[in-house]
Structure formats: C-alpha cells, structure tokens
Amino acid sequence: MLRTLLICANETRRHVIQSAADDTRLVRIVDSFEHYPDGNSLTRILSRFGPAVVIVDGQDLELGLASAATVRRQSPGAAILGVNASRDRYGPLRESIPVTIPYPPDVELLSDGLSVAVHKGEARHIQNLIAFLPAKAGAGSSTVAFNTAAAMAAAGRRVLLIDADLRSGVLSFMLSCLPVSSMQLALEAVSEEETLTWSTYCTRAHDIDFLLSGRTVMSPPPT
C-alpha cells in the first residue's frame, strides 16, 4: 500500500476523500489536513513520513497549488493527485498537479487517478537499482542477477537481491538454504513499514542480503 498524505479544504471533504481512498485498498493515509497547511507545517510532515502519494483538494485552487508546489519542492519523487480541479481551465495545474479527478471521487475513479499519477512519476532514473527482466522462463536471469550481486559484494558494495518471481523464484534453491522469511511476508507487512525491520525478512549469505520468494501465490495479488 502506498503511503499517502491527504490535504483538504475542510473536515467534510477530508472525510469524503479519505473514505474513497481507504476503499481503493491501494493507499494508506499516514496523515491528513482538514485545512490547507502553511509551508513549514507541510514541510515537516513531508520530512517525517516521506509519502509516496499526496492527494490535494482543489476546492481553493490557489491554496491547493501552493501546497502542491511545496510537495514538488520538498518531495520531488511523490506522486500528486488533484481532486476537484480543472486542468483545462487552470494552466498552472499542468506543472504542479498533473493528474486530476472530480469531486466527490468514487473508488474506481480514484483508483485510476492514483495509477496514472504514480506511473507518471516512475520515468525518473533511480540510482543504485538494477532490474533483471527475462524474456521467458529459464532464460538465466536469476543466475545473472546472482553473479552480478556477488561481484558487487566482492567489490565492497552493500547489496540486496530481491527475488520478485513470487510463484517460481529459484534463488533459494541456488543458495541451498531455507529462507529466513519471504518476499510474500514482506509485502503483507508493507502497510506497517514505518516500524518494519527489513532484516527480519532477509536471508544473509555470501555477504549479500537476499529477499527470497516463498514460491506461494498471494491472494489478492500485490499491486
């Protein structure tokens, strides 16, 4: 679930938007405002929680844009979703709030808006992240990832190797060990991540931290 900050014009609108957000089961509201915060208050909250998503109520467009601009400045990696703001009418929204939906939002509309907002922000380069995507099963991607991780660890780098093949991950077999925990359990606990100790879920071997697949199908599947 995505850590989410909610900025609203008043308590009634906060309740309506938060209820729809909770029903999507895509986000977890870590904090919310029932009025537009000043810049210092918003900066403190952003520094404390580092939200992945910020939902901004556009009832008062000027104050909503000011809040969005602060988010852009302080948390450039956060996705921003506007509610009740027209991009066609207000040009500045294209920069500060690139994705908007009408008020009151229903669950389907909010889910779609969240997906678009999050994926708009994922084109940026993420340092220190390497993804191995095989063309088909058995192509050797796990072996290449394993050897790359081992080479990086031998060069003195701290390495976490994640097996994201939930159904058929083979890294635990390659290590000839039983996982301490699993990727599946880590995903189930992610909604409590501010108190999450990641070492609880990792298996340590060859100077590498492994987050291994438990080779079980999650229901519902993670999003």
Image: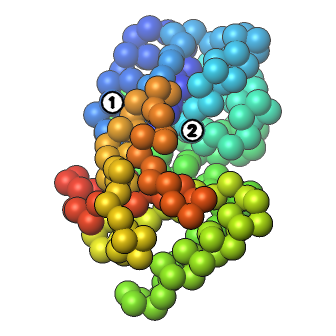
Give the x, y percent position of residue 41. Answer: 70, 10
Tell me: residue 11, above or below residue 125. Answer: above
Which quarter of the image is occupied by the N terminus?
top left
Tell me: residue 66, above or below residue 90. Answer: above
Q: Residue flagged by tag 2: what amino acid is it?
A: Ala
Total labels: the figure holds: 2
**Residue indicated by mark 1:** 22
Tell me: residue 187, above or below residue 147. Answer: above
Task: Label 2, secondary structure: give it.
Answer: loop
Residue beneath the point at 55% across and 74% down: 146
**Residue indicated by mark 2:** 52
Give the x, y percent position of residue 79. Answer: 60, 42
Q: Nearer the viewer, residue 211 or 31?
A: 211
Q: Answer left or right for 127 relative to 4.
A: right
Mark toward the start of the polypeptide (1 vs 2): 1
Q: CA distance from mark 1 to mark 2?
A: 15 Å
Residue 207 lies in what quarter of the image? Answer: bottom right
Q: Nearer the viewer, residue 155 or 186?
A: 155
